Image (spheres, grey):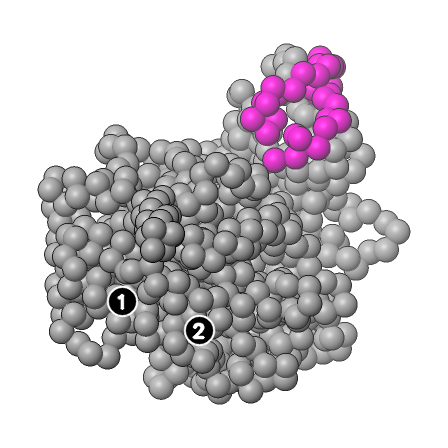
Amino acid sequence: MKRIVLVVLVLMVTLLMSAQSHNYLLHTQYNVERLKKQIKNDSAVNMAWKVQLDRANELVKRSNLAAQDCQELGLAYRITGDKKYAQALKNILMDYSSRDTWEGADLLNRNPPWKGGLPTSHTGFYISIGYDCAYDYLTAIERKLIAKGIVRVCINPLKDNWLDSGDSFHTFDTMGHNWWSACVYMAGFASLAIQNEIPEAKQWAVDIAKTITEWVGYTGSVLQNKPRNFDRSGGFYESVNYASYGISQYLLFRLAFNNCLPEIEQPKVDQLNKIADFFIHTTYYTNDEGPMSVNFGDSSIRKNGNAVVLLLWNLGFQKDDYAWYLQRVNSGKDKEGLQLNTPNGLILHPDMPILPADYKPTLSKSQLFADIGWATMRSSWENDATFVAVKSGLTWNHTHADAGSFIVFHNGKYLIIDAGNSSYGNPLYTQYYCQSEAHNVVLFNDKGQDRNDPYFGVVNRGALYNMIDGGDFKYLLADATGPYSRFLKRNYRSFIWAGDVLLVIDDLLAYEPGQFQWLLHYNGVSKRRGLDLSIKDGDAEVLVRPLFPETFPNGGLPHDFPEKMRLDEKSGYEDHHPENKKSYWAISHFEQTSRTKFISAITFKTDENKDNLPVIERFEGDDFIGVRITQNGKTIEVYLNLLADGRIKHRNSVIEMNGWQTDAYLSAITYNEGENGSDISNINDLFIGHGSYLRRDGKVLMHALSKYSAYIKNFNDKQNMIFQGQPDVTLSIYSAAKSSSVNLNRKTVKGVYDPNTKLLKVRIISDELND
C-alpha cells in the first residue's frame, strides 16, 4: 500500500512539475502582461481586444466549433483566466484529436496520397494554439490523449509527406515553394506544443529547425524550370501574398522555438535581415485608401508583409524602418496577416518606438530584385506619391506570363494595374488571369508568352537590369525576349522616369512581319482626348501618349488616319471577381512589320502641374528617334540610337545625333529651359545607357573601352555619378574645373586629371562600385 501511495505521489509531483515547466508557444506570460497593459493604455488595442472577447463569448455558446476558433478562445482564456473559454477549447481539442484525418479528399485521392497538406498544416496551427493556451486546464490524461492524437493526424502525416527520408515525396518546390515551409514548420510548431507529453517531439522540433538554411538557400531546378526561393536582396519569387505566408509560417515556428526551447540556439539565417525590406519596397502608402501592394502573380492588392515584419520584431529584428512600416500596415483583421484586429496579432502586438512625425525609411526609393525580376521605383516615401513597379522574370505556378509588365500607383490610387487573379478552381484563372493578355505587355499577332508557361515554367526567363535612381531621373531595362523567343528576337522595354513623365520604350524585332500591340489595364475611367489617353480615378489621373512609331490622331475619326496608332477596347475580367467583365486597352501599330520601336509617355498629373503640364515633343533624324520633355524650367532630350538595336554585327553602333557623337543605345541630356542644349557648359545632368563614349564639338564627355550605363547629376558642378558596368574599367569623365576625384556610387573615387583634355581618368577595379 505504501508503495502504491509513493508511486502516486511521485506521479503527481512529476505531472505537477511538467505543468509548471510548460513554456508557451506565443501566449507567453510576458506577452500576456504586455497585452494587458496595452488594453489599459492604448485605445486601439482596447477596441481590438473587445472585438476578440465578444467573438469568444459568441463561440462558447455554440456546440459546433471549428479548429480556427482556438485562436479567439485561447486569447480570451489567457487574458481573463475564465474557464468557460478553456472548456470550449477542450471540446475542440477532444474532437479534432480523435479524427482520422485533417486532410481533404482532393489531396487524399492523389497517388501517392497527400496525407498532410495545407489543410492539415492550418489545422495543426490552430489546434496547437488551443492546446497550448488550455494546457493548465487539461488534466494530465487529457493532455496525453490529445497529444497522441496530434501526432497521429498532424505531425506524422506532415513529416511523412514532406520531411522524413523513409516516406517523403515532396521537395522544396513541389507545390510552389510556400507549401514546404507551411507543412514542415507547422509540424515543428505542433511538436513544440506537445513536447512535455511526447518526449521525442522535442527532437523533432530541433531537427526541423535545422532545415531552414536549406529552404532559404534552395537554388532551383534546371530540368524542371524551377526558380530559387529567395532573391539575394530579400525578395521571394511567388508574390507578396505567398512571400508573407511562406515566410511567416517559418517565423511562427522560430518564435515558438525561442519561447519553448530558449536554451537551444537556432541556425543563423542572414536572409532574415533582408526580407522586411522587400515588403517595405513593394507597399504603396496612402492617406485615405489604406496600404496597397504590388500584386504581381497570385496576390492581392491588400496583401502585405505585416505578419513577417511583426514576427521579426518579436524575434528581436527591430529597426525604426520596421516600426514605420508596421504602423502603416498593422490595422485590419487579416488573421493570416496577424493584423491588430486578430487574436494572434493582438498577443504579438509590440510596444514600438514613437517616431518623429516626418520620419521616412532609410531605404532607397528604388530597388531591383534581380534574381526574381522585380523592380520598384517611387517619387518619395510620402503618402499618395507616385510608384511604379516592373516585372520581367519568372513564370511558373504562382507567377504569371507577364514578362515586361508594369503597374502604376499615383495620387493615392492604383491606376495602371495588373489584372490580378481569381480562385484556382475558376477556369478563367488558367484561361485569362495567368496569361499575357491580363498584363501590360507587348503582344505579337495577339499572342504573348506560351499559354503553358504558368504550368511548365520558362527555360529562357525574363530579366531586369541597370536600376539607376538619380532622384528626378530614373532608368530601368527589362528584357522579355526569352519568354517571347518563339516569335520575337528582341523584346526589350526601357523605362526612363524624368520629372512627372515616364517614358516606356519598347525595342521589338520579330522573325517575320506581323501586328505589334501593347496592352494597358486600368482602374477608373479611361478616354482618349486628342493625343492622350486619360486614365482617371477620383482626383488621380495619368495621361498616356504614344509617340513612336506614331501618335494617336489629334482629332477626327480614326478611320481617317490609317497611318496613326490604333486604340482598341478589349474585354477582360475584374481582379478576384471573374463574374465581372473589365475593359482594357490595346494600342496597336498602324501596320504589320517585323521591327518597330514603341515609345510612349505617361504623364503623372498633380495639383502642381495640372495647369502647366510637361511639354512633350517627338523628334527624329537619320537612324535615331527622340523625345524632348520640358517642365519646371528644365528640358531633357532623350535619344534612342536605332543602330544600337542589334542590327549591326562586328561594328560599333557609332552615330551622330543632333551633334552628339556616341555609340550609346540611349542618351539623355538635361539643361535649363531656353538655353542652348548643344553647349556642354549648359548640361545639368547626363545619362548614357549601354554606351562607351559621348562626345560633342571635339570634347570627350565620357569614355571607356567597354559599354556601361551611367548617370551624372550636376555635370558641370560637383558631379555625382551612378555607374554600372564591368568591375575592371578605366573611365574618363569631363570636368571643366580641375578635379582629383569624383563621387561615384556614393563613394569618393580618386583619379588623374588632364588639364589639356579636361578629363578626369579613374580606375574602377571593384565590383562593389557597381551600385
Within the magenta stretch, is there residue 690? no
Residue 117 is situated, as x and y percent measured from the top left of the image, at 51, 72
Neighbour tally class for label 2: few under 14, some 14-19, many 20 plus, Cα within 10 Å? some
Question: Is residue 455 something one can see in this rendering?
Answer: yes
Q: Left or right: where does residue 491 sit relative to residue 544?
A: right
Q: Residue furthest front?
A: 1
Q: Mark 1: which amino acid?
A: Lys
Q: Mark 2: which amino acid?
A: Pro
**Magenta part of the protein: which range?**
742-771
State the image quarter where residue 622 is shown. bottom right
Which is nearer the eye, 196 or 132?
Answer: 196
Q: Residue at x 50, y 85 (%)?
A: 106
Task: Name the residue tied to disc 2.
Answer: 119
Residue 752 is situated, as x and y percent measured from the top left of the image, at 73, 14
Q: Judge whether 667 appears above or below 566 on screen.
A: above
Which is nearer the eye, 308 or 623?
Answer: 308
Residue 83 is situated, as x and y percent measured from the top left of the image, at 16, 60
Q: Judge whether 130 appears above or below 323 on screen.
A: below
Q: Residue at x 36, y 74 (%)?
A: 96
> Is label 2 in a helix, a strand or a loop?
helix
Within the magenta stretch, is there residue 762? yes
Q: Which mark is residue 90?
A: 1
Mark 1 or 2: the one toward you:
1
State the image quarter where residue 266 is shown. top right
> Is label 1 in a helix, a strand or a loop?
helix
Q: Earlier in the sequence, mark 1 or mark 2?
A: 1
State the image quarter where residue 269 is shown. top right
Distance (Cα) linking label 1 and label 2: 21 Å
Q: Left or right: where does residue 235 sit relative to residue 525?
A: right
Q: Quadrant of the C terminus?
A: top right
